[in-house]
Amino acid sequence: MKIAVIGTGYVGLVTGTCLAETGNDVTCVDINVAKIQKMQAGELPIYEPGLDLLFHRNISQKRLTFTTDLALAVKDAQIIFMALPTPPGGDGAADLSYILGAAKDIAHLITDYKIIVNKSTVPVGTADKVSAIFKTYTDIKVDVVSNPEFLREGVAVDDFMKPDRVVLGTTSEHAKKIMTELYAPYVRQGNPILFMDERSSELTKYAANSFLATKITFMNEIANLCELLGADVDAVRKGMGSDERIGKRFLFPGIGYGGSCFPKDVQALVKASDENVYDFKILKSVMEVNELQKTILVDKVITYFNQNISGKHFAIWGLAFKPETDDVREAPALYIIKALLDNGASVSVFDPEGMENVKSIFEDKINYATDQYSVLEGANALLIATEWSVFRNPDFEKMSAIIADRVIFDGRNLFELAKMIELGYYYNSIGRALIEVKEDEMLLQQK
Ligand SMILES: NC(=O)C1=CN([C@@H]2O[C@H](COP(=O)(O)OP(=O)(O)OC[C@H]3O[C@@H](n4cnc5c(N)ncnc54)[C@H](O)[C@@H]3O)[C@@H](O)[C@H]2O)C=CC1
Ligand SMILES: O=C(O)[C@H]1O[C@H](OP(=O)(O)OP(=O)(O)OC[C@H]2O[C@@H](n3ccc(=O)[nH]c3=O)[C@H](O)[C@@H]2O)[C@H](O)[C@@H](O)[C@@H]1O
């Protein structure tokens, strides 16, 4: 099939590349000229594991092309995907201007029937708004389909190629038939294509993200309680997660959920609820708890240094909002850096992929190290904000020789407590026993 994908961000580029991989002719469009030029030159603009192989293969097979020319992209396309930003507007509601603007542009350009597929995360009623735009600006018939995307950054290619489910919101029989053909190669293992009306499909996406954000937040609160009660959140997590009704996944406590989606989507669903005079109490609490959790590590640091960290120097491992991505949007690390700077401390950071994106935010306010060891030079403590694999099994001997004080605040529970006792570190993690070194004695202190 001939396909156009509008927007080449994490979703658009993965969607376009993965659709080309099953034999479709895909043209990707973006308004960012530099980005398109980069991709035309065969360079990926984002870090996403596994994407480079598919990207290069499909470019060389001429199934995947890039342009800034919307007219060219939509001319022969049977299906037009919109993978455009839906950032929070000033009031927290999703800003639909990218989607509605693109719909208007497309309406002016088309000369034959198209299926318009919305992959962005959008409030309930958006498909109706997009349909209305087409009715206003063209006589050409289109079917507007809601097709929310559930991929995770870091495993986006796998998630797209083997989705747990494909959700398609449409009442058009023709669109159903074409979309079923398009997605057939991706659901071969028997995972379902779920057809529903547009509104239910749009809400499914917000419900899924908000539920996952709630699950994480619940565990963060359990972890905070574990610290006060002397329980171990790892044990509690395993005990809970073994119940199939609860499940093992997404129960890892940490320093709050970040990323470009959970924070904005929870907020947008709350806003949509408020607009419909529904007080979504759980989600309001989820937002509140997550705000506090993002700087919980800094609270621990300030307590450790007797309420004064002015003049202290801190090293941070991990900037990306999760491992295997360069994405730092709403990353807890950003809040941690800001809080440390606001309290008069200085900061050095290292992340395997997120450095460039953080440089554009903090510029020369912090130091950027070239590796995970040199970042420790002169640090009074190490703070861990992202669970990259490379941080999981470090050379502790090398670390201990560089870091000024053997003090770690771990927001991702990377290390075994017994190991930290053995190494003689002060080790403060999330929802687990505090390991303190006192008067040359190493002792495990339950708080
Ligand atoms: N990032 C993720 O993991 C996921 C994101 N989503 C949703 O997908 C949507 C897109 O998200 P991302 O890909 O992360 O966004 P992004 O910000 O990474 O990419 C958006 C792209 O659209 C381009 N763009 C903006 N206006 C345009 C226009 N008029 N014409 C052509 N291109 C234009 C931008 O230059 C940018 O390259 C959002 O609604 C998001 O909530 C859904 C599932 C996963
Ligand atoms: O709509 C979206 O954009 C996407 O949002 C999330 O994907 P993503 O944000 O890429 O990453 P996740 O793996 O969900 O992690 C989100 C945040 O939650 C945190 N998290 C996740 C899992 C966990 O157990 N604990 C935890 O703190 C992560 O550290 C991260 O900050 C969803 O998992 C995807 O299904 C969805 O498509």
Image (tube, rainbow, N blue to C red):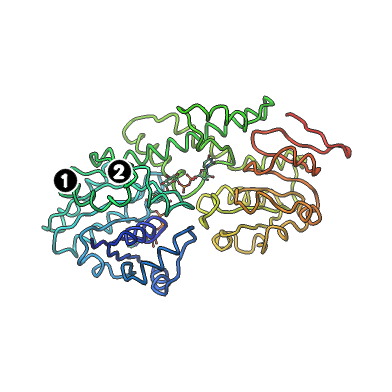
Percent from the top left, x then y, of residue 309? 74, 47
Residue furthest to the left: 139
- Name the residue furthest front: 189
Q: Which residue is mark 2?
A: 167
- Residue 94: horizontal and vertical position, in percent? 36, 47
Q: Name the residue at 66% across, 64% down.
A: 370
Location of the C terminus by quadrant is top right
Numbered label attached to residue 172:
1
Q: Is residue 443 left or right of residue 339?
A: right
Q: Name the side, left or right, on which 285 lies relative to 446.
A: left
Q: Quadrant of the N terminus?
A: bottom left
Residue located 64% across and 64% down the image: 364
Q: Amino acid at mark 1?
A: Ser
> Mark 2: which amino acid?
Val
Q: CA distance from mark 1 to mark 2?
A: 14 Å
Circle 1 — which element? loop
User: Residue 291 at x, y = what percent?
Assistant: 54, 40
Sort mark 2 into few (<14), some (14-19) or many (20+) by Cα contacts within 10 Å.
Answer: many
Looking at the image, residue 35 lies above or below residue 342: below
Dot 1 alpha-carbon crowd within 10 angstroms: few under 14, some 14 to 19, many 20 or more: few
The disc, 1 or 2, on the residue closer to the chain's N-terminal end is: 2
